[in-house]
Amino acid sequence: MAKGVHAEEAKAFSVRLKQALEDAGVRPSPTVVANEFNTRYWGKSITPHTARAWLAGVAIPMQDKVRTLSEWLQVAPDELRFGPSPGAAVMAREPSPLERRLNLQDREMLAQYLTLTPARRKTVQEVVAAIAIAAQRDQPPK
């Protein structure tokens, strides 16, 4: 177990990691974290035991791993590792209701959508509109 200041930092990192996972719609399970992390990290894979140590506040990952976690969970690496900077509260803004409803998969899908050509975006819009209309028809009357 980590001692002293390191133990406090590891615990604080654990809290921030769990919050980032929750915000991204990812279950904070050591196995889930290890598997998802390993699909994104090009270095040596981590084990569920390592992920458990991060989640339990026993260990803090090296900076290259923090960077991978932050890219995956879409949080700033410094904020994940050290917490919000003192000036962050002034600059932070409240996420919109729509932003709060988007999980990690939604944000990844939107990022992919934004890479499409205008013609393909139009096709996606038409498909989504058709599915929404069909879903409304399937709903029982209120």
Image (spheres, rainbow, N blue to C red):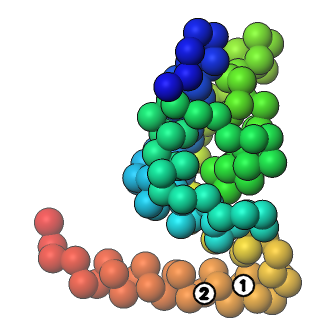
Q: Nearer the viewer, residue 63 or 58?
A: 58
Is residue 45 toward the left or the right of residue 67 in the image?
left
| Other-residue count near label 1 (Cα within 10 Å), few / some / many at <14 / 14–19 / ≥20 | few
Do we see residue 46 in this rendering?
Answer: yes
Q: Nearer the viewer, residue 85 or 126?
A: 85
The residue type indicated by label 2 comes to: Glu
96 w.r.t. 105: above or below: above
Is residue 71 toward the left or the right of residue 95 in the image?
right
SS category of the residue bearing label 1? helix
- Tell me where residue 48 appears, x and y as whole percent: 48, 56
The residue type indicated by label 1 comes to: Lys
Residue 126 is tagged as 2
- Tell me where residue 100 appears, x and y as whole percent: 52, 44
Q: Nearer the viewer, residue 105 or 50?
A: 50
| Residue beneath the point at 63% across and 18% down | 6
**Contact? badges 1 and 2 (CB < 8 Å):** yes
| Residue beneath the point at 63% across and 10% down | 5
Residue pointed to by mark 1: 122
| Quadrant of the rendered image containing residue 8 | top right
SS category of the residue bearing label 2? helix
- Work out how far the residue at label 1 is from the one at label 2, CA to CA, in angstroms: 6 Å
Residue 23 is tagged as none
56 w.r.t. 38: above or below: above
- The quarter of the image holding the C terminus is bottom left
